[in-house]
Image (cartoon, rainbow, N blue to C red):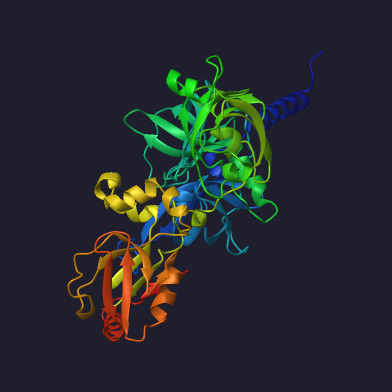
């Protein structure tokens, strides 16, 4: 007996509908937001100036609650952020509600709720199950709003640098040929329609890319939930691999054991506060054995740098057990993890959304030394920047032992009546002004404000010319002239 035609049609329609529903999954057109930003960075060689505004376009992943995930590079030094619907072009000003330059992540929201930017769009689910050998998809959007999907293969999972020097986190290394798009600065990476990472960089020559993985994204988003973002902890050590037999014998490490040698410990870091010392050998962290190259075996990814145990697998406030060898004897330390903010370093490792601290006095330009200042000399800055400042950046311990909070230095000298004979002096670190020790820029401002009875300021340096003298009255006259002819602000102390 055959079914009536109407029931047959209904059955076929129901089957097709069910098939369509089952096959539906997130697509670029439905879960991507265009992000437009205007960036304006500071000039570290002329600290009273800012660079020209530059536009940047990228794609963000839509999350629950009308939040948009992008990399922090997308909004670094931003003066304006805008969210745009991928198809309709509806736009709304955006605001940053979460930001971590070390993890290279940011979360955006619309600045007001009266917007059509999210009409018809669906938030992405999250997936942290990626392993080496799997295929992922990189999402892009054409100018007309059509989605573009490119398959990439996960070659390996390792630990590497994201955006900030000295910050290493988990990475997916993938291979595939990506198409160039005008809004391709930052791109979502998905697995079976679920967000699993954000594209960090791409080499067209090698057709390989680095992907910021979901475990780091999840830690970032979880930290944001209570409104008091703490960031990712760091151990704060410089290590040496224990591959050399002489070093192993010196440290008292059995040749069958692994371990890494602690070369130095940063001030006020997790390591220093937890009792780690220079010369210690770390054998295991939280029960995970560390080999002679500094790796441990991760249950999902295989061999990873031990940095992931601290900076990617734990959070601020966690305590980890460190099994070490000190003075050829085994012992254990329970180390509570902390995060050292960039402004807490002797030399700021990065400086975004805030300008360099400086003070101009009579044509003498003083600054606090930062890594961005050194990087102003270009990619070859270790060889091109002033040698003594590069050396100070590489060896901050000797200055920290003196009690220095920051290194204030004379960066340049403008030719003025107050600075005659000093025009060639630059890149020397300040020690005292009028007998007052200078540990940060505010000390310098206070020292100049306390004018000596004879009106002559005595400025001392750690190196040639050792001492210079400037007249208070002449310097103040020059200061007024500088304000009138192009320098709008003589100091930035905060």
Return the x and y of residue 215 as percentages of the image width and height.
Answer: 61, 36
Q: Would residue 401 appear left or right of 115 to someone viewing this image? A: left
Q: Residue at x 38, y 57 (%)?
A: 55
Q: Would residue 137 appear left or right of 115 to someone viewing this image? A: left
In the image, is residue 155 above or below residue 105?
Answer: above
The quarter holding residue 31 reads: top right
Q: Residue furthest right?
A: 1
Q: Residue at x 79, y 22 (%)?
A: 4
Return the x and y of residue 333 as percentages of the image width and height.
Answer: 66, 35
* Image quarter of the N terminus: top right
In the image, is residue 139 above or below residue 344?
Answer: above
Q: Residue furthest left?
A: 421
Return the x and y of residue 274 as percentages of the image width and height.
Answer: 63, 42
In the image, is residue 470 above or below residue 83?
Answer: below
Foreground pick, 132 / 255:
255
Q: Inspect this view and state whether residue 363 appears.
A: no
Q: Residue at x 54, y 22 (%)?
A: 252
Say how many tags the image has: 0
The quarter holding residue 376 reads: bottom left
Foreground pick, 445 / 218:
445
Q: Would residue 473 appear left or right of 152 to someone viewing this image? A: left
Foreground pick, 202 / 265:
265
Q: Residue at x 59, y 53 (%)?
A: 118
Q: Inspect this view and state whether residue 94 appears.
A: yes
The quarter holding residue 383 reads: top left
Return the x and y of residue 84 as percentages of the image width and height.
Answer: 50, 55
Foreground pick, 461 / 191:
461
Q: Would residue 291 appear left or right of 79 to someone viewing this image? A: right
């Amino acid at each position: 007996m055959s079914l009536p035609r109407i029931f047959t049609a209904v059955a076929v329609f129901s089957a097709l509908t069910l098939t369509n529903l089952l096959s539906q999954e997130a697509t670029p057109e439905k879960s991507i937001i265009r992000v437009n930003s205007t960036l304006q960075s500071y000039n570290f060689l002329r600290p009273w100036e800012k660079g020209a505004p530059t536009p940047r376009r990228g794609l963000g992943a839509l999350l629950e609650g009308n939040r948009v995930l992008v990399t922090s590079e997308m909004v670094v030094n931003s003066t304006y952020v805008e969210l745009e619907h991928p198809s309709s072009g509806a736009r709304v000003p955006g605001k940053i509600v979460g930001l971590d330059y070390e993890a290279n992540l940011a979360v955006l929201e619309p600045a007001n709720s009266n917007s059509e930017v999210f009409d018809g769009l669906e938030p992405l689910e999250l997936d942290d199950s990626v392993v080496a050998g799997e295929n992922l998809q990189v999402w892009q959007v054409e100018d007309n709003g059509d989605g573009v999907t490119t398959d990439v293969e996960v070659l390996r999972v390792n630990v590497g640098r994201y955006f900030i020097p000295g910050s290493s986190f988990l990475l997916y290394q993938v291979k595939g040929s990506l198409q160039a798009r005008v809004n391709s600065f930052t791109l979502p990476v998905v697995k079976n329609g679920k967000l699993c990472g954000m594209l960090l960089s791409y080499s067209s020559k090698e057709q390989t890319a680095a992907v910021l993985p979901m475990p780091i994204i999840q830690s970032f988003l979880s930290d944001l939930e209570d409104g008091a973002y703490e960031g990712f902890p760091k151990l704060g050590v410089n290590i040496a691999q224990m591959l050399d037999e002489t070093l192993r014998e010196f440290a008292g490490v059995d040749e069958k054991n692994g371990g890494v040698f602690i070369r130095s410990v940063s001030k006020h870091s997790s390591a220093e506060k937890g009792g780690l010392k220079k010369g210690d050998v770390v054998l295991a962290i939280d029960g995970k054995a560390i080999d002679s190259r500094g790796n441990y075996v991760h249950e999902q990814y295989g061999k990873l740098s031990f940095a992931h145990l601290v900076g990617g697998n734990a959070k601020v406030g966690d305590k980890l057990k460190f099994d070490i060898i000190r003075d050829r004897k085994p012992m254990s330390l329970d180390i509570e993890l902390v995060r050292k903010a960039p402004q807490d370093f002797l030399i700021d490792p990065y400086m975004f959304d805030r300008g360099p601290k400086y003070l101009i006095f009579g044509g003498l330009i003083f600054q606090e030394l930062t890594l961005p200042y050194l990087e102003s000399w270009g990619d070859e800055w270790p060889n091109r920047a002033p040698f003594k400042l590069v050396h100070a950046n590489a060896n901050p311990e000797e200055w920290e032992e003196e009690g220095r909070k920051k290194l204030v230095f004379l960066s340049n000298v403008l030719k003025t009546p107050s600075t005659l004979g000093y025009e060639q002096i630059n890149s020397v670190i300040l020690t005292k002004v009028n007998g007052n020790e200078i540990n940060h820029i505010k000390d310098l401002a206070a020292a100049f404000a306390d004018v000596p009875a004879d009106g002559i300021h005595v400025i001392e340096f750690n190196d040639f010319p050792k001492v210079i003298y400037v007249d208070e009255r002449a310097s103040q006259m020059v200061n007024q002239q500088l304000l009138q002819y192009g320098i709008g602000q003589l100091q930035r102390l905060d």
